[in-house]
Image (cartoon, grey):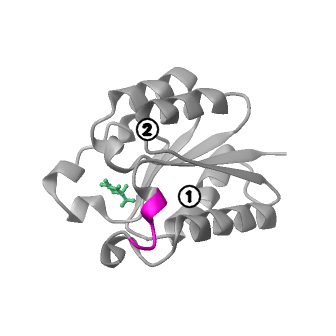
């Protein structure tokens, strides 16, 4: 059965209480439950990992090789700083969608650059928590496994 990894980076464990006017009211548990339910409806498996640590995110990408067909990655602030995450995606060649709850391009200048976009299949941002299930659908279409 196809499996996707939902990988969330730093501060996303604070969803629900963190700047809700920007990131919404849904908690990370809400988001992950919606992803798992959507996956079940699509006949796939969805696994979820969150870490505040760059190296742990690199390790999760390495471990995804052979275990997951694709990654939905909200790397949080590491999006804008992490060559290591860029290299992990490039090195494993796992199809990855870059995701953000907020529209990073409508925000501060330092959020406009992404090290992930260059190695991503595509980018989804600005749709809040709904972006995660949109990203699952986009990944299944990319993989040719949309139901
Ligand atoms: C974010 C946007 C990033 O710029 C920020 O650092 C985050 C969350 C988003 O989901 O909108 O932590 O990735």
Judge by depth and name the residue closer to the eye, 78 or 111.
Answer: 78
Residue 45, how many percent across, how many down?
A: 78, 52
Spot the residue most to the top: 91
Q: Which numbered disc flags the more N-terminal residue, 2 or 1?
A: 2
Residue 53, how many percent across, how many down?
A: 43, 38
Q: Is 83 on the left-hand or right-hand side of 54?
A: left
Near mark 1 (Cα within 10 A), the count class, few <14, some 14-19 or many ≥20, is many
The residue that appears at 62% across and 57% down in the rendered structure is 136
> Does dot 2 land on a helix, a strand or a loop?
loop
Which residue is under mark 1? 135
The residue that appears at 37% across and 50% down in the rendered structure is 76
Q: Which residues are magenta?
A: 13-17
**Alpha carbon distance from label 2 to label 1:** 23 Å
Quadrant position of ligand 1: bottom left
Residue 66, how many percent across, how many down?
A: 72, 28
**What number is the disc on residue 53?**
2
Residue 147, how many percent across, how many down?
A: 78, 61
> Does dot 1 land on a helix, a strand or a loop?
helix
Residue 15 lies in the magenta stretch: yes
Residue 131 lies in the magenta stretch: no
Q: Quadrant of residue 106?
A: bottom left
**What number is the disc on residue 85?**
none
């Amino acid at each position: 059965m196809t499996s996707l990894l939902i990988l969330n980076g730093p501060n996303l464990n604070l969803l629900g209480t963190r700047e809700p006017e920007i990131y919404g009211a849904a908690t990370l548990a809400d988001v992950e439950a919606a992803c798992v339910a959507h996956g079940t409806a699509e006949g796939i498996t969805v696994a979820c990992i969150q870490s505040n640590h760059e190296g742990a995110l690199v390790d999760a990408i390495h471990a995804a090789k052979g275990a997951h067909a694709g990654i939905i990655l909200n790397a949080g602030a590491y999006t804008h700083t992490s060559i290591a995450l860029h290299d992990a995606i490039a090195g494993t060649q796992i199809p990855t969608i870059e995701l953000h709850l907020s529209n990073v391009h409508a925000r501060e200048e330092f959020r406009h650059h992404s090290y992930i976009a260059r190695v991503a299949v595509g980018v989804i941002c600005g749709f809040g928590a709904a972006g995660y299930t949109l990203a699952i659908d986009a990944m299944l279409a990319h993989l040719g496994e949309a139901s």
